[in-house]
Image: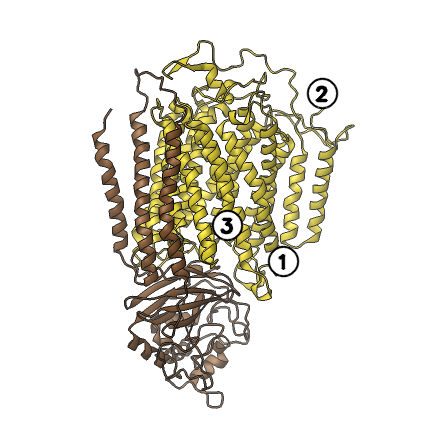
Chain colours: A yellow, B brown
Amino acid sequence: MTAVPAPLSPPRGILHRPKASTGFWSWWTTVDHKKIGILYGGLGLVFFVIAGIEALLIRLQLAGPNGTVLTASQYNTLFTMHGTTMVFLVGMPIATAFGNYLIPLQIGARDVAFPRLNMFGFWVFAFGGLFIYSGFVLGGAPNGGWFGYTPLTSTPITGGALPGHGPDFWAIGLIMLGIGSVTSGVNFVVTILNMRAPGMTLMRMPVFVWMMLVVAFLTVFAMPAVTAALIMVFFDRNFSTNFFVAAAGGDPLLYQHLFWLFGHPEVYILILPGMGIVSEILPVFSRKPLFGRSVVIFSGIAIGFLGWGVWAHHMFATGLGPVATTAFGLATMLIAIPTGVKIFNWMGTVWGGSLRLNTPMLFSLGFIAMFTIGGLSGVTHSIVPADTQQTDTYYVVAHFHYVLFGGLIFAIFGGFYYWWPKMFGRLLDDRIGKLNFWLMLIGFNLTFFPMHFLGLAGMPRRTYRYASGMGWDNLNILVTIGGFVIASSVLVFLVNVVKSAKNGEVASADPWDGRTLEWSIPSPVPEYNFAEVPEVHAADDFWHRKYTEDEEGRLVRLPAGGADDGAHHGDGHGIHLPSPSFFPMVLALGLPILGYAAVFKNPWLAIPGAVILLFGIYAWTIEPGTAED
Amino acid sequence: MRHPKWRTGAPVLLAGIALALAGCGGSDNHQNTLKPHGTDAGKIKDLFVPILFVAIIIGVLVLGATIYAAIRFRHREGHPDNPKQVHGNTTLEIGWTIIPALILAVVAIPTVSTIWDLAERPTGPKVLQVDVTGKQWWWQFGLPKQPMVPQATALDAKKPGTGPIITSTELHIPVGTKVDLSLHAFDVIHSFWVPSLSGKKDVMPARTNHLTIEANQPGIYRGACAEYCGLSHADMRFRVVAEPMAKWKAWVARISGPPLGAYGTAAKPTDVYTLTSKTYGCTNCHTFTDPHLATYGPNLTHLASRSTFAGGTLELNHKNLKAWIMNAPKFISMESKDCRLPPPATCVGMPSFTKNTPKGQKTMTSEDADTIVNFLLGEK
C-alpha cells in the first residue's frame, strides 16, 4: 500500500501531488474514469442494499392491515428515503458508473474530457448521500416524500406538520447531488462530442453512448429546475420567504411545475441508460446487429425531447383544467410511440438470432417484458379521467416499478453480468447468475403485479396503515413475500460477486464475442485503455474486424480478427495520463459543511465550509492537469 | 420447432388475467374504482376498462413473442451459429410506428371527450353545493353553501347563527342528486377521493377546485385523502353517505338544530360545560352547541349522528370515544402538545389529556371522560 504523501510545499500546487495509481489510497485521489466508475457503482450498490432494507421494512409494516411494525413517522421517513435513495443514490449513480466506465472505452478514448471534475462529481455524490442520511442522527431524516410537495415541506418547523430538520436535509442534499449530476453530465457531453476516436462518427457510436449523451443533456437541463424549487423550499422554511405560502400570495402549485419539469425528464434520465445497456447486450447474445439501429437511436432522442413536454401528467388531479390536461394527456400518448418502436426493434433484434441465454441476455429479455408491462400501464395513465382514479394509488406504484425496477434495475444487473469480466478480469458465475435472474423475475412480479389490483381496488399509496376488511389483505401478503424474494436474489448476486473475486473464471479480452471497442482491449482494462488509439470504420467496428457476411447475409468468421490480449500493440509505455489529485475531494468536502451550516443556520460552520471550498477551487485551479514527471 | 403448449398458453394467460381482474372487481369494498356507484366513476370505468383490455392484449402479444423468441431462437449445440444478419426493415419499422399511433389516436377520442365531460360543473337549482375543507388530518363539510334542493326549514338566513351546516368525516348526500363540491385546503395539499363515486381532485390552499359527485344508489362509500399530507395522512379517511332524498332531508333537519341535551352556559354551567369549556379547554378547538360554526377542530354538535370518528378510523361507541378523548395520540399519530391554549394553536391534532399534563392543569379522570362521552353520544 502506498502511503499518502505528506502535504508539504512543492514548487507547484499546494499539496504534494498524490502519486498512487494502485492500492487503497489510489481510490481517494484517482482521476481514472474506470476507477471512478467502479466507485460510483460500488457506492450505488451500497445504497441499493440500504434502499432495499427500507423497502423490506415498509413491506413488513404493510403485510397486514393496521400494521404496528413502524410508527407513522418512521414509515413516512422510510418511504421518503426509499424513493430519494433509489432515484438519486442508486439509479443515477449506477447509470453514471456504467457511463464513466464505458463511454471512453466505447468511443476509443483514454479518459473523459475533465478527469478531475469527474472525481469531483463522485465525491459530491458520496458526501451528498452521506449528508442526507446523516439526518437520521442529526435531527430528522427527510420525511416529506421524494417529491417533497409544498407547502408541506416548505412550512417552517413550528408548523408541526413535518417535525424536525427532514426537509432541510432533503433540500440541501438534493441541491448538492444536483451539482454532482450536472458536472458529470457536462463531462459526458464534452467527452462524447470531442473525444471520439478517428472514424467514430456520431452514427457509428454504440447505442449505449448515444443514450448516455441524451441522458447527459437531460441532466444538465433538468437539474436547474429542481434546484430552483429546492432553494425556494429552503428559503420558505428558514428565511420566511413566501414562494409557496398561498395566504401570502405565493402558490404551492408553482413547486409542482418546477419539480416535475425536472421530475419527468428524470424518469428518462433513469431509463435511457437501461435502454442503452440492453441495446448493447441483445445484439451480442443474438449474434445479430441491432435491428433498425438508427431508429433506436432517434427514438431515444425523441423520447429525450418529448420528455420535456409531459411533466403535467403528474398533476392531472391538481385542477389544471381541461385544456392543460388534454394537451398533456395527448403528449403522454405520443411518447408511447418511440418507446414502443424501441421495444419492437429489440424484438426484431432477437428474432431469427442465435440466442445465448446467458445471464446478461436473460436480464435483457426480462427488461423487454417487464418494461412493456410498465409502458402499457403508463399509457393507461394518459387516459386522464382514468388517471384521476389511479394517481397516488398502488396502481402507480406498480407502474413505475415496472418501468424503473423492471426496466432500469434489470438492465443494470444485465450490465453487471455483461461487463463484470471487462471491469474485474473475472466472470460472474453464470449458473448463480441464472438463479439470481429467476429469483428476481419471480420476486419482482410477485411484488409489483398485485399492486395493480390493489390500486384499482382503492388502496392509496404513502399510507402507513390500512383498515382491515377492504379486501386488500391477501394481495398485500403476496407483495411482502415477493419483496423478500427480491431481497434473496440480491443476496445471490452478492454471493456471486464474492465467489467471482475469490475464484471466478478468468476472463479473456472478449468473453462474449462482443461488438464494441471495449472488447478489443485486455480484461481488466489497462490504465491507459488503448495502447494505440483505434481507427473506426463502421458501427460495431470490432465485430467487423472479426466477422463478415456471405451473399445470404449469414455470418462468416474472418481468419485474423480478434481482441488484443495485450500481446501486441506495445505496453502503453509513454502514454501520458492525467495525474491523481486531492482537490476534487477537498472541494467536495466544503459542500456538506456548508450544508450543515445552512440546515442549522450556523454561520460559524459556514466559515470552515467556505474556506475549504475556496481553498479547493484555488488549489485545483493552479494545479496542472498532469504532474510533471 | 413447434411448441403446441405455447399456442394454448397465450389464451390461458389472457383468460387468467381477465379472471384476476374480474375477481378483483368482485370484492366491492365501496372504495373500488372498478365497482362504481356514481355517475362519473361509471364513466371513468367505462372508458378505462376497454383500453385496459387492449393494453393487456398488446402486452400478452409482446410477452408471448419474447418468450417464444427466447425458446425458438436459442442456440443449440451442434446447430449452425451463423444467423442471417438483418439490419432492419423499413416497412416493418414504419408499420410499428404507425399502428401504435393509430391505436392511440382511437384511444384519444373518447379520452378527450370524457375529460371535457367530467370538467363541466353542474348548474341549476337541483344541484347541491358543498364546501369541503381538508385539514391535517380530517375533512370538514359545509352544506349547503347556497339555497339548493327544496330546502330544509332549519336553514333560514335571517336567524342568527345559521349558515352552512358544518360537519366532519361523514358527508351525507341525497341519491341521484349532482353534488358540486368546492374544495379548499386549510393547511397543506390534500386530495379528495371517493373511488366509488368519481376520480380524485386535489385540495389546494388558496385555490378552489371543483369536483362533481353523484351517487346512483344508496350506500356508504369510503373515501381517503390521496395526497401525502404529513404525519397521519394514512388516517385521513372519510365516508360519503348517500341516502334517499327524504331520509337526507330528515338528516339535514336533525343536525342543523341545537343540541338535544343540556350543555349549559357560563351563567348556568352543567358538569359537561365546566369540563369542556374550562377544565380541559375542549372548546378552544371544538364547539358542542352550534352546528353552523367552523372550528379549528371538528364541530362536535350532533356528533352521535355519525358512525365513525377520528378521520373515519374508529367506530363511534362509548369505549372508543372515551379512550380517544383521554389519549387521542395513542390512536392517531399527531404533533399535538398542550392544546389548552387558545387557537390558533401550533399543534396539529388532539392532545393527550392523560399524559404529559402541563403544570397547574388537570389530568383527565375516567369519570370526567364518561361525563363528556355520555353527553356527546346523546347528540344524534
Q: Please, what is the three-letter code of the amino acid marked with disc 3?
A: Trp
Name the image quarter holding the C terminus of chain B: bottom left
Quadrant showing the N terminus of chain B: top left
Going from N to C along the chain, the mark reached first, 2 or 3, is 3
Measured as percent of width and height from the top left, residue A357 is found at: 35, 26
Marks 3 and 1 share the same chain? yes
Q: Please indicate, yes or no, whether residue A353 appears anywhere in the rendered image.
A: yes
Compared with A150, B346 (above or below) is below
The local crowd at label 2, few if under 14, some if 14 to 19, many if 20 or more residues have their Cα within 10 Å, is few
Q: Are marks 2 and 3 on the same chain?
A: yes
Residue B118: which quarter of the image?
Answer: bottom left
How many angstroms separate mark 2 from mark 3 (CA)?
48 Å
Q: Nearer the viewer, residue A213 or A285?
A: A213
The residue wearing badge 1 is: A238
Contact (Cβ within 8 Å) of mark 1 with mark 2: no
Dot 1 lies on which element?
helix
Which amino acid type corresponds to the residue marked 2 in the rendered image? Answer: Asp
Badge 1 and badge 2 both on one subunit: yes
Chain letter of the residue carrying label 2: A
Foreground residue among B48 and B287: B48
Q: Which mark is residue A146?
A: 3
In the rendered image, the vertical position of residue A408 relative to residue A155, given as above or below = above
Left or right: A220 in relation to A447: right
Q: Chain of mark 3?
A: A
Q: Which numbered circle lies on residue A629?
A: 2
Q: How many marks?
A: 3
